[in-house]
Image (cartoon, coloured by chain):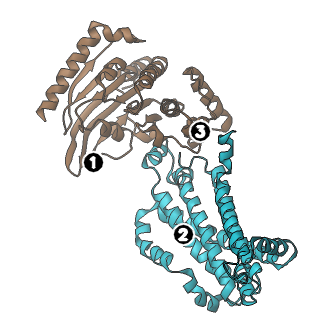
Chain colours: A brown, B cyan
Amino acid sequence: MELSANARAAATRTAPHVTIRGLSKRFADATIYDNFDFDIPRGKLMSVFGPNGCGKSTLINMIAGLFPADKGEILFDGQPLNKIKFGYVFQNYREAVFPWLSAFDNIAYPLKVMGVPKKERNLKVEKIVASLNVKIDLNLYPYQMSGGQQQLVSIMRALVVDPEILFLDEPFSALDYEMTLFMREQLQRVFVETHTTTVLVSHDLEEAVYLSDRILLLSRHPARPVEFVHYDAPRPRTDKTMTEAEFISTKAHCLEIFQREVRKG
Amino acid sequence: MNWKRLEVLLPLVGVVVLLAVWSVVTSLRIVDPVLLPSPAATFKALWTGMFHGKLGVDFIKTVERTIYSTIIAAIVAIPFGILLGSSERLYRSVEFLIDFFRSTPASAMFPLFLVLFGVGDRTKIFVAAFGAALVILFNVAYGVMNARKTRILAAKVMGASRLRVLWDVMLLESMPATFVGLRNGVSLALVIVVVAEMFIGSVDGLGQRVFEAQQMFEMPDMYAAIFAAGALGYGLNLLFLTIERRFVHWSGK
């Protein structure tokens, strides 16, 4: 059956972005995922939250292809990973940026890998820097920058390819509190501007709720989705958002589930 | 008085003390002046030898041999080091051989290399290159093997091919270790070259100069040649450090 162009576009808009089916992963001492199914919604900022060692990072690492799953299928609009453009931000920015390249060349590197000509690379980097309103001297090398600036560079590096989906693995947990607050605002800004499907692994519930449209709460391993919490407070969210009743009740609800899951261990 | 400004002179203190003690010892004739000439006589011999005598020629000869052997060692060892380092299994399978020959004094290889290459320059250069190559190889391989896993993953996640990861990431990750290897390699090459110049039928080079001066009992000349060799070793190390700071600016940061 043939769909009209309009119907197809509508279907694409509402269909899940990523479909995970039958995902299984065993490490030497534990089964982390056993026949795990999940759909990642399109154009939402989603956080993954759960007890220690339940496999939060493992999940996005497998989705982003950092290491293979033992079994299962992960498709992006029905396509495999190597057909799509995505960005990945590591927790350990110090070891993820390239110290031999200037900040500018770090951000441009994925474009170089894709074979984009130099002129176009420079334009794209300048565009992303301008859109984030970043005021760092990009001729500096990473080791001449603060931790937050380095992580900002690696976030821009992930965004410069216009990714269809953005993964962040505890991106702010190695930063001091002041920088963390600043970086949350930067990430929110990116999301408001691009509405790129974003998957954030966080170990900070307040951060997860504050930033997210959806919070995936996982059980202890073998991990299964316990609840998929919706939080639809309007953006841009501010410090005031965190004092509102809806935020407080959502956070309390997540905490309750989290503690129930922890106690089960 | 600005003491802070004087602190830059601290490294000279040791030198001044050494020269003072040396002057006192020679002027009081505590040591036989034939065995230990005065600093003035020694530096005069160094000056005339370097700029008007044969010492300058010998100096250049030793520099040439050391540089040639280091270049040969680097050309052979760096690609092999990268190859071995990029596969831990491959490295483990030849690790014993590398460690064994790295631990074998290169001077013990002189007779073998003499048979293979005769008494000319080639023998000296090849023995030194042999010693230096193993040091460089070992450091490069470890540099590649210890490349940050996260950085390699980061490049892979961005779609870099295996070859690109090797070229863009592993090669650059190994640079600090490579330079450690090059500095150790050039020092070892100098040691081997000087020893080779002493003992295997040489007509020139600093080793031959030291040996000949000692045979002729020209003590100021001998000390002058020793100082020239010392200055050469120090200078080569400094040269490689400068290159390293320039090209591997991220090292240790």
Toward the bottom, the furthest residue is: B115
Q: Position of residue B35 (x, y in %)?
A: 69, 82
Q: Position of residue A72 (x, y in %)?
A: 27, 42
Q: Quadrant of the C terminus of chain A?
A: top left
Residue type at numbered disc 3: Tyr
Q: How far apart are the alpha carbons under marks 2 and 3?
A: 30 Å
Toward the left, the furthest residue is: A264
Residue drawn at (49%, 53%) of the image: B162
Question: Which is nearer the eye, B147 or A18?
Answer: B147
Callout 3 crowding tier (Cα within 10 Å): few <14, some 14–19, many ≥20: many
Residue A110, quarter of the rendered image: top right
Residue holding disc 2:
B135
Residue type at numbered disc 1: Asp
Residue drawn at (55%, 86%) of the image: B108
Q: Position of residue B20 (x, y in %)?
A: 69, 65
Question: Which is nearer the eye, A157 or B188?
Answer: B188
Residue holding disc 3:
A141
* In the image, residue B173 above or below residue B233: above
Which subunit holds the residue at mark 3?
Answer: A
Mark number displayed over residue A70: 1
Residue A213, quarter of the rendered image: top left
Toward the right, the furthest residue is: B52
Question: Which is nearer the eye, B230 or B191?
Answer: B230
* In the image, residue A66 above or below residue A262: below
